Image: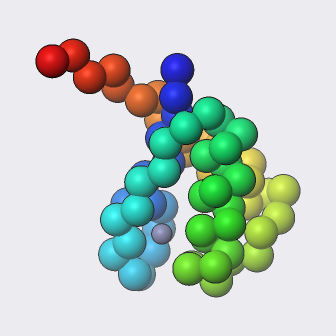
Amino acid sequence: MRKIADCRDYPSEMNCTLTIAGEEQEVVRAAAEHAASVHGHADSPELREEIRKLLKDEVPQHA
Ligand SMILES: [Zn+2]
């Protein structure tokens, strides 16, 4: 099961629409780096824990 971090779910004044999907540890790392580089957050264990809490399960796509 892949996880999704959707930047629209995070409080931001930038109207960022980035979505990151992948294994949980990949998403948390990528989202933390994105939050630091784009949104100016400090990349910390606390930030990563917040991101982990907001991850959603990817909904399988059935054609
Ligand atoms: Zn963003």
Residue at 34 percent of width and 75 percent of height: 15
Residue at 65 percent of width and 35 percent of height: 24
> Which residue is at the front of the view, 18 or 48?
18
Residue at 42 percent of width and 29 percent of height: 58
> Which residue is at the front of the view, 7 or 33?
33
Quadrant of the rendering where the C terminus is positioned:
top left
Q: Is residue 34 at least partly visible in the picture?
A: yes
Q: Is residue 50 at least partly visible in the picture?
A: no
Left or right placement of residue 33 versus residue 56 in this view: right
The extreme top residue here reads 62
Q: In which quarter of the image is residue 40?
A: bottom right
Q: Quadrant of residue 16?
A: bottom left
Query: Residue 17: horizontal and vertical position, in percent?
Result: 34, 65
Query: Residue 36: horizontal and vertical position, in percent?
Result: 67, 75
- Please say if 41 is above or below 1: below
Residue at 64 percent of width and 79 percent of height: 37
